[in-house]
Each structure stands twice: as C-alpha cells, then as structure tokens.
Image: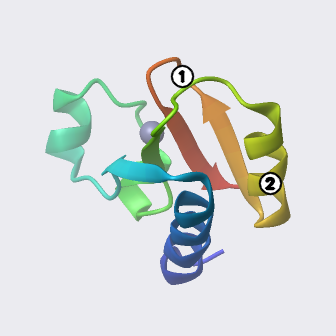
Amino acid sequence: MNPIDFAMACMLVCLKWRASSTSWGRTEKRNTLVKGFPGSYHLNWLGMDIVLDDQRKILEFEKDCAIFQIQALYEGNHYHLQPK
Ligand SMILES: [Zn+2]
C-alpha cells in the first residue's frame, strides 16, 4: 500500500468512526523525540495514530479497519494504524 492509498483508507475509517488523527508522518528526529519504534511505519507515512471520540478498544472498529486493509493496534490512549 502506498502512502496516498493509506491516507485515504485512514480518512474513511476516521470519518465513519468519528476519529481524529494525532500523528502521521514523522522525521527520524521527531520519531526519537516521541519514543517511536525504530523503523516505525510513521517514518514512511504509513503509520497513523488516531483517537476515537469515544476512545476505547472496539473490536468492530478493528474489523472494519481490516476491510480497508489497515491493521488497528490498540495502544490505550490511541489506536496506531498501519497497512495490513
Ligand atoms: Zn503510531
């Protein structure tokens, strides 16, 4: 999946599930600053952090992301999205 298709898929799930993006592409410097995983998908604009208006673990949301070829990883105060 390229970054444009990824962004489009993320936008669609965010619009459907009432979610906001809080982080997308990052430089290496920024990734280190926020204690991102080395080699993070954020470095290639293929990682996005989002917060649902009703932020909690929702299996139905995670299944819906999979339909858009996105893997949704619950990280407590946000979801990390990346290509499946
Ligand atoms: Zn992330």
- The C terminus - image quarter: bottom right
- Provide residue 20's location: percent of width, then percent of height: 39, 51
Q: What residue is pinned by disc 2?
A: 64
Please state, as top left, top right, bottom left or bottom right, where the N terminus lies in the image. Answer: bottom right
Q: Is residue 74 left or right of residue 31?
A: right
C-alpha span from label 1 to label 2: 17 Å
Task: Give the structural element (helix, strand or loop) at label 1.
Answer: loop
Residue drawn 15% across and 42% down?
A: 29
Residue 34 location (% of width, % of height):
23, 28
| Relative image position of residue 9 (x, y in whole percent) | 62, 71
Mark 1: amino acid: Glu
Q: Is mark 1 within 8 Å of ligand 1?
A: yes
Q: Is residue 24 left or right of residue 49?
A: left
Q: Determine which quarter of the picture holds residue 73.
A: top right
Q: Which residue is mark 1?
A: 75
Q: Nearer the viewer, residue 61 or 73?
A: 61
Frontmost residue, 36 versus 14 = 14
Under mark 2, the amino acid is: Asp
Residue at 52% from the left image edge and 32% from the top image edge: 54
